[in-house]
C-alpha cells in the first residue's frame, strides 16, 4: 500500500493504492472520500476491498494533495465549492478514476467506484456523468441530482446503501432518486435503524445524525461483496 | 422431501417438508405461499433453502388440504377471506410454524419465515403478531398494516425484498411500513427495475404487473442467504 500522486488539469492530488497480496491483473475499486478528504477511514475501506474481497483499491482525492479537513468548518470549506460545482467535481473524479486504472497490476477494463457520505454523492455523479465503471456503490451518500446533468443516461449498475434515519437524505430524496434513475439497473438498500455515517467507525454525533452502526456496516459490506462479485464476474 | 398433513383448529392442512441431505438438528425456514396456495413455486424455493443454504424448509398451507387456485378468480376466492381477516390468517400461520418446528431433524429454537406475494404479507404479519421466529423475509409482498394489530411490537429481524415498480406495493406503502416498523431491526431492498412476482419463474403478466426478473431473483436470494446466516449464527 502506498500514497500515489497524480495530476488533473495541472494540479496535484494524492490517492492511496492497495493491491491484494500475491495477485495481478485484478479488477479495481475506486473509493470516493467523505467531506474530510482522503483519511484513515477511506484507507480502512481500501484495506477491506484488497484483503477481504481480493480486488485492487484506489482511494481518490478530489481536494488536492495535503488538503484535508478535521473540524466541521474545515470540512465544509473543502466540500462546499465542489458540492456547488458538480461539473468540476465530476472532472476531478474522472481524473481519480484514470489514476486508479493506471496503477500496476490493475485490469483497467474492470473498474467500479464506491463512496461514503459526500463520496456517495460523488460515485452517484460518476454514474450520472457516464464515467467508464461497471458499477458504483454509495454508502450513506447524499442523493440529490446533479444540476449539470438534467437527464442522466445511467449505464453503470447502481447500489445505494442507505440509512433510513439519515437526516441528510430523507425519504423524499429516496423517492426523487428512484424517479431520476428510472430505467437504470439500480438497487437501494434501506437500513431501518441506521443514520448517516453508519460505516464510519467512531462516528457518534447525534445532533448531526452521524452515528456508526455495526449491523448496517457489516450488512452493507456483505452486500457490497455480492455486488462487486456480480460486476467483476 | 414429502407432503406433511397437520391440524389447526381441527381442520387439516398439507405442507411440504424438505431436509438438507445428511444433516440433522438444523435451523428451519417456514415458507408462506402466494395467493394460489402451496404450489410448485413454493416447493422450488424450499428446494433452494435445503439444497443451497443447508437448512430444513417447511412450506406452510393456510388454505387447507387440497385447496389450491389456478385461475385469477380461484386465487382471489381463496386469498380474499384471509386478507380480510388477518387474525385468522395469523392463527393459521402460527399453526404452520408449529408444524415446521415439529418436524424430525429440526432445531426448533432456530426458525425463520419467508414468503412470496401474499406470503410476503403473511410473514410480515408473523413479525407483527410476535410469532416465535428469529427473522422474516418478504419477497414482493404486500406491505399493508394488519388492522388487528394497531401498534406492532416487532421482535423478529425483518428483510423486505421489494420490486420498486410493483403496482401492488407503491412507494407510499414503503413509506408507511417504514413508519409502522420504526424501532424494529428492518431492512428494505428496493430493486429498481423489478415488478411484482419477480422471483416467480414464468410470471409474465404485464397488465397485472407480475413479471419474473432474473436479476432481482438472483440478487434477492443472495441477500436472503446472508440474512439467514446472520439469523442462525
Image: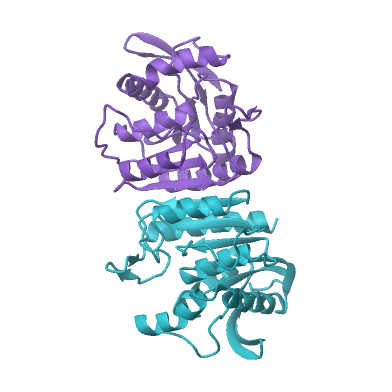
Chain colours: A purple, B cyan
Residue at coordinates 59% horizontally, 78% vertically from top-left? B88
Q: Nearer the viewer, residue B173 or A8?
A: B173
Residue A65 to residue B22: above or below: above
Up-down relation of residue B53 to residue A144 (above or below)? below
Q: Position of residue A162 (x, y in %)?
A: 50, 41
Question: What's the residue at 30%, 41% (across, down)?
Answer: A155
In this rendering, the answer to whether B232 lies above or below B45 is: above
Horizontal and vertical percent position of residue B6: 65, 86
What percent of the width, then of the height, locates residue A142? 44, 32
Residue B25 in sight: no
Dividing the picture into quadrants, the one containing residue B31 is bottom right
User: Where does the image place residue A152, in percent across and percent down from the top left?
Assistant: 27, 37
Task: Tell me the quarter of the image containing the N terminus of chain A.
Answer: top right
* Residue at x-position 24% and y-position 33%: A150
Position of residue B217 relative to residue A165, above or below, is below
Answer left or right for B202 relative to A140.
Answer: left
Q: Quadrant of residue A61?
A: top left
Instruction: Using the rendered image of the protein, determine whether residue A194 is visible from the camera's viewpoint.
Output: yes
Q: Nearer the viewer, residue A152 or B208?
A: B208
Amino acid at each position: 500500500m502506498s500514497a500515489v500522486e497524480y495530476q488533473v488539469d495541472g494540479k496535484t492530488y494524492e490517492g492511496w493504492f492497495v493491491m491484494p497480496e500475491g495477485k495481478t491483473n485484478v479488477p479495481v475499486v475506486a473509493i470516493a472520500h467523505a467531506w474530510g478528504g482522503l483519511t484513515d477511514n477511506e484507507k480502512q475501506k481500501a484495506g477491506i476491498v484488497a484483503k477481504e474481497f481480493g480486488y485492487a483499491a484506489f482511494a481518490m482525492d478530489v481536494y488536492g494533495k495535503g488538503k484535508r479537513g478535521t473540524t466541521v468548518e474545515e470540512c465544509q470549506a473543502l466540500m462546499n465549492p465542489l458540492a456547488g460545482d458538480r461539473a468540476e467535481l465530476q472532472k476531478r473524479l474522472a481524473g481519480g478514476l484514470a489514476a486508479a486504472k493506471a496503477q500496476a497490476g490493475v485490469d483497467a477494463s474492470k473498474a467500479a467506484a464506491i463512496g461514503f457520505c459526500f463520496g456517495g454523492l460523488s460515485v452517484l455523479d460518476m454514474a450520472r456523468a457516464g464515467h467508464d465503471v461497471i458499477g458504483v456503490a454509495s454508502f450513506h451518500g447524499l442523493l440529490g441530482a446533479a444540476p449539470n446533468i438534467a437527464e442522466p443516461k445511467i449505464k453503470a449498475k447502481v447500489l445505494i446503501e442507505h440509512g433510513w434515519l439519515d437526516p441528510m437524505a430523507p425519504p423524499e430524496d429516496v423517492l426523487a432518486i428512484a424517479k431520476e434513475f428510472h430505467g437504470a439497473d439500480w438497487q437501494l438498500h434501506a437500513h431501518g435503524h441506521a443514520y448517516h455515517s453508519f460505516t464510519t467507525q467512531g462516528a457518534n454525533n447525534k445532533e448531526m445524525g452521524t452515528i456508526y452502526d455495526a449491523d448496517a456496516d457489516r450488512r452493507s459490506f456483505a452486500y457490497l461483496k455480492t455486488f462487486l462479485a456480480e460486476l467483476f464476474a
